[in-house]
Image (spheres, grey):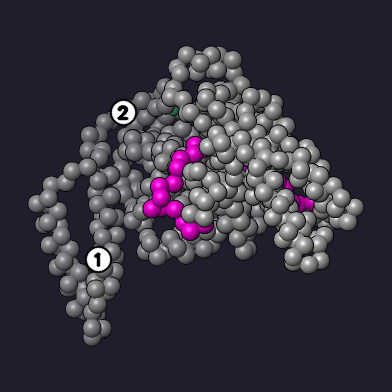
Amino acid sequence: MEYNIEKINEIGKMLAEVVGEAMTQTEEEQVRIGDVEMALRETLKAVGQSGLKQFLENADSELEAEIECTCGGKLQYQRRRAATIWSVFGKVVYKRAYYAGCDCQKGHAPVDNHYGIEAGKVTAGLAHLIALSGIKESFDEGRKWLKEYLLFEVSENTVRSETQKMGDLQRRADQELVNAMQDEKSLQQRERSQPAVSDILYGSIDAAKVRIEPRDPKEKVLENRETWRDLKAGCWYEGEAVPVRQQSTRQKEKVQRESVVLRAKQQKYFCDIAEAQEFGKLLWATGCAAGADRARLLVFICDGAVWIWNLIAQYFPNAIQIVDWYHAADRLKRIAEEVFPTLEERQTWLKQVTEDLWQGRVELVIEACRPLAKKSKWAQQSLTYYSNNIERMRYDQFRASNLLIGSGVIESGCKQIVTQRLKLPGAQWHLDGAILTAKARTAWMSGEWQKLVSARSLLPLAA
Ligand SMILES: [Zn+2]
């Protein structure tokens, strides 16, 4: 947007005067720059309110005696009627032409319709900021942050409802994508469009527990229900080499072992609290959107839960499957700690077996674990784990093909959704609230927030 710089300077000059006058009235002896900034912000907020009011009031200067109603009937001009909205500048009351008198009993304000305003409600611009605070912090904490930024208060409930409205838009988008990718016609259409193809595309899936409150408190007492549910999350991404000057110390150490240090880029997250089969449809749909079926190489890196590998086999049978290196290696550490009493024994065993794993000699790892299975339940479980995942642990081959072997992307994703948001102190969730908040946050993490903001600005018209 381009502004008339002369007018801006004029307004700036007026602002400086207004703020200067206000400040001379203050008792404070020493005015600091922070005081001036704050006074300017307060003034700009008031100017914004006035500007928005005048803009909207100027917008419907062309009055008509009669207009068409959405039902097909006729509406007559009544008067200029006041409406209140909550904008990024706070409360704005403006008057606009109001039409009524149709048989359908509905009134109509063309200006509201034109700008997507819902009288009495939050504007799309403010909704965007409110929801941003709601995906980052608890709703109450978000409310406090907003007050600092916006210089006025909204309620905790407003933060909740606007955040979850964004989540609902994401849920609708997910559902549309799922429907389209289950539909033969849409799939064929997509086949013809042929967008750009990734060389190597990665997918990762994981789950984390979220505590869900029953709708009715009695429910819990009566049935003593298990209230922990799995939030399932996935991510599509590509890999790129980390430039040497950006490498962390840990990564530089890794260079000693590996030819290139890779990191994820263009992460697209998705999530739901649903059964595996239902989640599978979302996996497939988001995978199609990410071009998973078209990449030269599709690679899944996961921490081996059975339902995850089953979904991958069902939807992407040709993908390379990799067990996350860190989970595989950490198991060995825990076995060593449980089984060997001395540090020396522990380290000797661990050094050899970790090297075997790193070189993809999984059979040797299994042999090393076998005699320990009698001594430790963990070793016994791990024996099964390594035996079931032999081909998913050929780390030598994966490294030779320059593939990522760690599923840090999805662990970080689950952490950002669950640990850093759903599990914040004081958080209590009904199923829907948890899903919607998680989906809204996922859109932000995927760089898709702007899509929700655009969809949100169309909301009153769509309703
Ligand atoms: Zn009507």
In the depicted view, which residue is nearer to us: 107 or 171? 171
In the image: residue 2, left or right of residue 362: left
Q: Quadrant of residue 185?
A: top right
Q: Reading the chain from its start, which is encountered first: label 1 or label 2?
A: 1
Rendered position, 219 above or below 13: above
Instruction: Report, in whole angstroms, how far the alpha carbon at label 1 lies from the one at label 2.
Output: 44 Å
Which residue is rendered at x = 44% and y = 46% of the image? Answer: 242
Camera sees residue 86: no
**Label 1: which secondary element:** helix
* Residue at which label 1 appears: 40
In the image: residue 258, left or right of residue 386: left
In the image: residue 447, left or right of residue 368: left
The magenta stretch spans which residues?
Answer: 226-251
Residue 94 image point, x, y percent? 31, 49
Quadrant location of the N terminus in the rendered image: top left
Rendered position, 150 above or below 355: below
Residue 297 image point, x, y percent? 55, 27
| Crowd class of label 2 (few under 14; some 14 to 19; many from 20; radius 10 Å) | some
Q: Quadrant of residue 75?
A: top left
Residue 238 image point, x, y percent? 49, 37
**Residue 1 highlighted magenta (yes or no):** no
Q: Nearer the viewer, mark 1 or mark 2?
A: 1
Which residue is rendered at x = 18% and y = 43% of the image? Answer: 2
**Label 2: which secondary element:** strand
| Crowd class of label 1 (few under 14; some 14 to 19; many from 20; radius 10 Å) | some
Residue occupying the far left of the picture = 6
Type of the residue with mark 1: Leu
Q: Quadrant of residue 278?
A: top right
* Residue at which label 2 appears: 66
